[in-house]
Image (cartoon, rainbow, N blue to C red):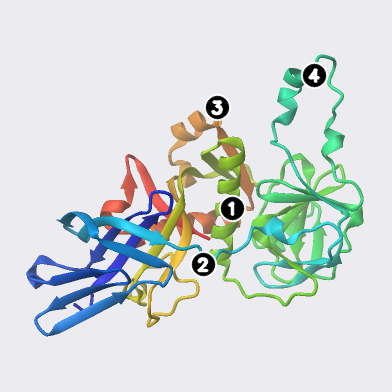
């Protein structure tokens, strides 16, 4: 009974949930299981264990159906679940950027202040990167547009799906920022990873930890990646956010935004070195996860709820998450699928620093192995959750 753990996956739109009581083996039966609106109780002889659900979650006991034991997983059941919205959701990076409001940029890896008290006159969202291909459909005369129209001017900040663009001359960079030319071999050897940027872009790195933050393009525009920056209003204190939680949240926000605005659900994660790292298929964006502390013991593999949870915390917490299917692409894996997706107009490419791509792949893999075995695969894809 002490080893029993709870896993609950909730779909917010349908108010349905899959409840799995893990590590409940047949040799320990008979076990009395009582499902109550705010708790799950297990009782065997004099031994009793209670899983207290988060206060945002209310289950409907009479709706329990599909009760079955799955070897290796535990006891499965489906039921109606009402899940609240008072969950810990890290805000999207761009939400901290407001016109005429002072903000400070920090390196997310080490906390170094890289741009202090920066004020933008305009903060605008960029259109799809292939917008220019549709100009002929919009205009009955030669295109009045050109690429320079999407280059930020002094005081501008343009927001992409996973990056922001600023005019290099308008940034009041602090002492924590360093610009490295691509032909600087000594600088490359001192950085945390060897990057081969396209088009001769200069690299922007954190002077303290040498993390790649972005790149300066020949046009004088600087691109910063959301996963590498923490942007806060200048008057606010600096929050401590674990990098694993930050990267997952930043990517989840990008996937949700692109799926809702551009009906894109398949994504190719590539590095600034040009290599493919992950193929991702967004499955659900209305998911809540609840997991008992028993699944987060030090002897267990990393779980999705390690952020903000201790091994003895009670009750369980609820997290908003996105459910994804993915294929690893490192070491020439899934090369045929990479080529097929690369020629598909419905697949969106997201580019990140190589180190971040590897970190993301590790997080997806750790998420996958923490799931009950029967939930780890869907068709030929591996399943994982990105918590927000």
Q: Which residue is mark 1?
A: 253
Marks 2,4: beta carbons within 8 A: no
Which badge, 1 or 4, comes first in the chain's sequence? 4
CA distance separating discs 1 and 4 = 33 Å
Is any part of residue 202 visible from this angle?
Answer: no
Q: Position of residue 347 (x, y in %)?
A: 55, 34
Marks 3,2: beta carbons within 8 A: no
Please tell me whether mark 2 sits on a helix, a strand or a loop.
Answer: loop
CA distance separating discs 1 and 3 = 25 Å
Viewer-nearest residue: 37 or 153? 37
Q: Which residue is mark 3?
A: 343
Is any part of residue 226 visible from this angle?
Answer: yes
Labels 2, 4: front one: 2
Which badge, 3 or 4, comes first in the chain's sequence? 4
Q: Position of residue 59 (x, y in %)?
A: 32, 63
Numbered circle sitting on residue 86: 2
Quadrant position of residue 224: bottom right
Which badge, 1 or 3, comes first in the chain's sequence? 1
Residue at horizontal 31 percent and vertical 56 percent from the top: 80
Which badge, 3 or 2, comes first in the chain's sequence? 2
Residue at horizontal 45 percent and vertical 31 percent from the top: 336
Which badge, 2 or 1, comes first in the chain's sequence? 2
Q: Which residue is mark 4?
A: 139
Labels 2, 1: front one: 2
CA distance separating discs 3 and 2 = 41 Å
Residue farthest to the bottom, as pictured: 46
Marks 2,1: beta carbons within 8 A: no
């Amino acid at each position: 009974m002490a080893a029993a753990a709870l896993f609950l996956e909730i779909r917010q739109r349908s108010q349905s949930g899959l409840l799995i009581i893990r590590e409940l083996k047949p040799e320990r039966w008979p076990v009395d299981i009582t499902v109550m609106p705010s708790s799950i109780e297990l009782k065997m002889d004099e031994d009793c264990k209670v899983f207290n659900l988060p206060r945002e979650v209310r289950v409907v006991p009479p709706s329990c159906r599909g009760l079955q034991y799955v070897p290796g997983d535990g006891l499965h059941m489906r039921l109606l679940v009402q899940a609240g919205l008072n969950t810990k959701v890290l805000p999207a990076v761009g939400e901290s950027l407001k016109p005429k409001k002072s903000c400070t940029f920090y390196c997310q890896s080490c906390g170094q202040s890289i741009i202090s008290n920066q004020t933008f006159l305009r903060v605008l969202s960029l259109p799809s990167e292939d917008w220019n291909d549709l100009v002929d459909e919009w205009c009955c005369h030669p295109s009045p547009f050109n690429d320079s129209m999407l280059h930020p001017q002094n005081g501008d900040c343009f927001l992409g799906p996973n990056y922001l663009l600023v005019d290099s001359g308008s940034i009041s960079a602090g002492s924590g920022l360093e610009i490295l030319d691509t032909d600087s071999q000594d600088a490359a050897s001192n950085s945390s990873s060897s990057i081969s940027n396209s088009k001769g872009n200069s690299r922007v790195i954190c002077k303290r930890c040498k993390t790649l933050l972005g790149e300066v393009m020949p046009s004088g525009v600087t691109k910063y990646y959301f996963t590498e920056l923490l942007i806060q209003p200048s008057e606010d204190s600096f929050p401590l956010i674990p990098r694993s939680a930050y990267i997952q949240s930043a990517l989840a926000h990008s996937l949700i935004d692109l799926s809702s605005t551009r009906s894109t659900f398949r994504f190719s994660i590539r590095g600034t070195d040009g290599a493919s790292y992950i193929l991702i298929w967004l499955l659900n964006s209305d998911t809540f996860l609840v997991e008992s502390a028993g699944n987060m013991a030090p002897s267990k593999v990393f779980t999705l709820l390690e952020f903000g949870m201790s091994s003895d915390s009670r009750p369980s917490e609820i997290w908003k998450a996105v459910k994804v299917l993915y294929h690893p692409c490192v070491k020439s894996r899934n090369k045929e699928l990479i080529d097929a997706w690369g020629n598909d107009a419905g697949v969106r490419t997201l580019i990140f620093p190589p180190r971040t791509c590897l970190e993301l792949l590790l997080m997806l893999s750790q998420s996958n192995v923490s799931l009950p075995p029967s939930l780890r695969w869907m068709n030929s894809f591996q399943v994982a959750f990105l918590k927000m």
